[in-house]
Structures are given as structure tokens and as C-alpha cells.
Image (cartoon, helix red, strand yellow):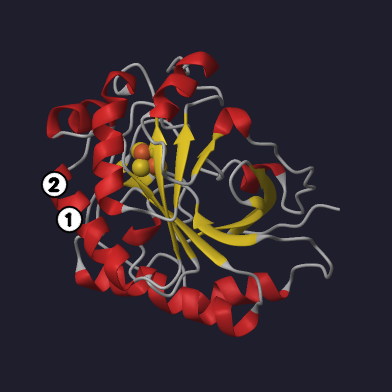
Amino acid sequence: MENKFKYIYGPVPSWRLGSSLGIDLLSQKDKICSFDCVYCQLGATKVFTETRHQYVSENNIIKELEGLPDGIPIDYITLSGRGEPTLAANLGSVIKSIQRNRTEPIAVITNSSLIHRADVREELSHADLVIAKLDAPKQDIFEIINKPLETQLNTIVKGIKEFKKGFKGKLAIQIMFTDDNIGCAADIANTVKEIMPDEVQLNTPLRPCSIVPISEEKMLEAKTFFTGLNIISIYESNKKDVKPISDIDTLKRRGKE
Ligand code: SF4
């Protein structure tokens, strides 16, 4: 049976989250993001911004969650979707509302662009799992691969370190390897070791996009630089067999699990 959900999608099988029920806090037709990553599966960024704004009320999200059929296996409720979820000004209050209504752990997948802001760090701190992007060891590579609007890489790294200090949940750093940054794997690993996250997620764009993924062999070589950290890699993970309850249109929102 298909349901017309506007803000929630899935659950979708995720190599790092198991059965992941997505919530799109932006829920606009066009992608809203502070980056325009070369590998983005959602296409070019249409609304390029670092300004936070409320797009969907928490009441509407909770109403949809209340409409979920019983008994759906969900490992994580994941705030992700068509763009950068920390651009939603009500991120923190939505997380808290979901926690009052559901028992599943909450994950946020962020590009880290706003993590230098104290308000964003405070809101993210209510999640159980934060997956923060870090694709580059220095500004020039960052600009090539992530094409940020304004943020500087050193500000992001400082923000992630600050966030890690006070965060009680699990922090994962996700790295998307492409031809642009695979040669810098050792330098990225050094930065990640300064952060000491709970998990490192080594990824490469296997879903259709214009960027050729890194081979399994090269990913294994890159993995050696991260020795000593808790590593998961897209090539070595299995996806669960998950049946979505949302319809095809809604499923198109997924992009980052
Ligand atoms: S991959 Fe994520 S951070 Fe990069 S442009 Fe797409 S939505 Fe934004």
C-alpha cells in the first residue's frame, strides 16, 4: 500500500543506518543547500544559502509520523532529504518533538557547514547520531569537491571538534572519496584523527551521478590511513531488505543515506 507522505520517506535501506525512515525538514521541490558537491545525487543546488529558515512545522511532521502504519521496522529516524537539514531553523525543536512521540534513535546527516555556530551545535546535540561530512583536508580541495557558498574548511573542522567535546551521542565523520580527494586520504585521515569521532564512514558515489566511483581496491588502500579508528566502508557493508511505505515521488527525496 502506498501512502501520500509529504515530509517523511522510506524507510530506505541504508548501508550505515540499517532501516532508515527519512524526514525532509526542507521539503521543497528544489534542493536547498550551502554546498554544491560535485557528486550530489540531487543535481545542482538551486537555492544556495547559509541562512536558516523554518520550512515545515514540527506539528505537520509529527502528524505524518502519527500516520505511520504500526509495526514498521525502523532502526533510525533520519533527518536528511533534499538539501542540508541544519538550514531548517526548527531542527532542534523537531528533534525534541520526535523524541516525545517515538522511541527510535534519531540521526542527522549534515554537511557540517553550519556546525561552527553555537545554536546549530546545541540543536544537533539532541540527536543520538550525527553524521558530519568532511571530504577535504585543505581549502582548495574543499572548494573543488564541495563548492561551498562561503564557509571556510578550518571553521568547519574547528566546529566539529567543539561539537565532539560536549556531545553525548555518537559522532560519525563521513568522507565521500572521488578522484578529486582520494590522493589526500592520508591528510584527511590526520584531520579525522584530531577529531577522534566514534565512527568513520568511507564512501564513494556508487549511485548514478556524473562522478566515477573510486574502485574497491583504491578504497582499501585509503582505509589503511584510518587505522586505529572505527571504520565502516560502503564496499564492505550490507544493506538490509527494507520495504518503503512512502510513494515513488516521496522516495525521490532520499539522497544521502
Ligand atoms: S551532497 Fe549534500 S551537501 Fe553536497 S550539495 Fe548535495 S545535499 Fe548539499
Reading the image, the residue beneath label 2 is 154
In this view, 40 is above or below 5: above
Residue type (three-letter) at the residue carrying disc 2: Asn
Residue 201 spot, x, y in % from top left:
47, 41
State whether residue 242 appears in this view: yes
Ligand 1 lies in quarter: top left
Element type at marker 1? Answer: helix
Residue 10 spot, x, y in % from top left:
68, 51
Residue occupying the point 52% across, 81% down: 97
Residue 57 spot, x, y in % from top left:
47, 74
Element type at marker 2? Answer: helix
Residue occupying the point 51% across, 14% down: 217
The reply to whether the C-beta atoms of the residues labelled 2 and 1 are less than 8 Å apart is yes
Reading the image, the residue beneath label 1 is 158
Say whether residue 131 is left or right of residue 147: right
The quarter of the picture where the C terminus appears is top right
In this view, 99 is above or below 85: below
Question: Is residue 97 or residue 56 the one in the foreground?
Answer: 97
Mark 2 and ligand 1: say if the CB distance to the nearest ligand atom is below 8 Å. no
Residue 224 spot, x, y in % from top left:
42, 28
| Mark 1 Cα shell of 10 Å, populated few (<14), some (14-19), many (≥20) | few
State whether residue 90 appears in this view: no
Say whether residue 3 is left or right of residue 131: right
Splitting the image into 4 quarters, where does residue 86 fall? bottom left
